[in-house]
Amino acid sequence: MSKTGQKVQVSGEELEVEVDGSTEQHYVSVSGIRIRLAKPYVLDFEWVGNKPVLNQLRASWFCSHEGEKPMNPRLVGKPGVGKTALAYAAGKTLGLPVYFFQGTADTTPNDLMITPLVVETAKDMSKVEYIASTVISAMIVGGVCILDEGNRMQEKAWASLAPLLDSRRYIESVSVGLMLRAHKNFRFVATMNDDASCFDLPEYINSRLHPYIGLDFPDRSEERKILEVNLPFTDPVVLDYTADFLALARKEGEEYTPRDGIHIANYAGKLVDFEAHSGRDLDPGEAVVLAIEQILGIRQARYMKQILWRERAVTKS
């Protein structure tokens, strides 16, 4: 609580971020209380997926007039189609730091706020340190907050975010008596899985998370690029076969994701490389079959076997 016992109202733009030279931790001070900020999410990759969807997300955040507010979109799709990667890529195109919060069934309102933590400084000595969540950190510095798998959170956690997700754009933290208004550059997106294991969001949250942006499976050419970007050292033939497998399997009604493809191609490539290192040869197609069997199941490998049978039939003819 503030020294006066009164609620402090402050905007992210008004707070100066300090860097501790010994720990490189970032802090802000509010009414004599020092608050440690979370670190942004750092990935080194290039988004090669659906560019129109990327631009839809960027458009929902776009503000061309003074006082205009960004929207709070939700990205929805099957697990593994690249929702988090898309959100991260969109944030980086804006030149903003990106923060990540993983929603879970046991997320509490305090997890999203500022938490007092007792830190031991020496033997029989301790102090209270205030730790900002990634949501609060993004609000202060003017970054992007990705709330991943938001529909795994229960209503009580979402309730604390309600004023942040409308035109008020603030959060109240009871632990430090602070009403924090988001920095003007702050952007928010919730990713949500399209499956039956998730909670239904309360209507007052549903009404705040717009637009609804769906992310579907990539086509074969996009898939091949995704595999190459994620697995630059893997045999290109393995990547070709994996992209062919995913395209054929989806045509037959399966819903294998780019994440599945990355695991398959990664393992198949390692099988090929390991055998080569041991002085033996392993056909890349057979390696992909084995990888599918051990990652998705024996029955699922039938699509890859069809591809090899057709390829060999053409060769024989």
Image (cartoon, rainbow, N blue to C red):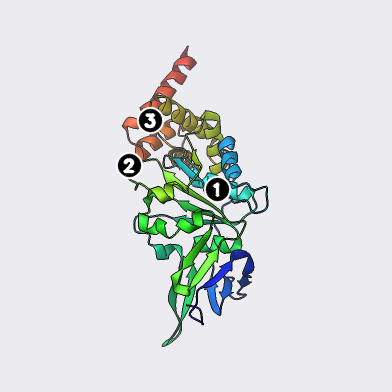
Residue 231: tell me if it is visible.
no
Residue 204 horizontal side relative to residue 89, left or right: left
Q: Which residue is mark 3?
A: 254
Q: Secondary structure at mark 3?
A: loop
* Above or below, 236 relative to 209: above
Q: Nearer the viewer, mark 1 or mark 2?
A: 1
Amino acid carrying mark 2 in the image: Ala
Amino acid type at mark 1: Met
Q: x, y percentage for residue 53?
A: 55, 38
**Residue pointed to by mark 1:** 71
Residue nearer the viewer, 202 or 123: 202
Q: Residue at x 64, y 50 (%)?
A: 94
Number of other residues with Cα within 10 Å of mark 1, as a class: few under 14, some 14 to 19, many 20 or more: many
Q: What residue is shown at x 59% (from left), y 71% (from top)? A: 24
**249 or 237, which is in the foreground?**
249
**Residue 51 appears at what percent x and percent y?**
59, 37
SS type, badge 2: loop
Residue at numbered disc 2 = 196
Mark 1 and mark 3: Cα distance apart in space: 34 Å
The mark nearer the N terminus, 1 or 2, is 1
Kindly identify the residue that appears in the image at 43 percent across and 87 percent down: 123
Place residue 305 in its image quadrant.
top left
Q: Residue furthest top?
A: 317
Q: Is disc 2 surrounded by few (<14), some (14 to 19) or many (20+) residues within 10 Å?
A: few
The mark lying in front, picked from 1 and 3, is 1
Q: Residue at x 48, y 66 (%)?
A: 172
- Report if residue 12 is visible in the image: yes
Q: Amino acid at mark 3?
A: Glu
Residue 25 spot, x, y in % from top left? 57, 70
Q: Is residue 218 above or below residue 233?
A: above
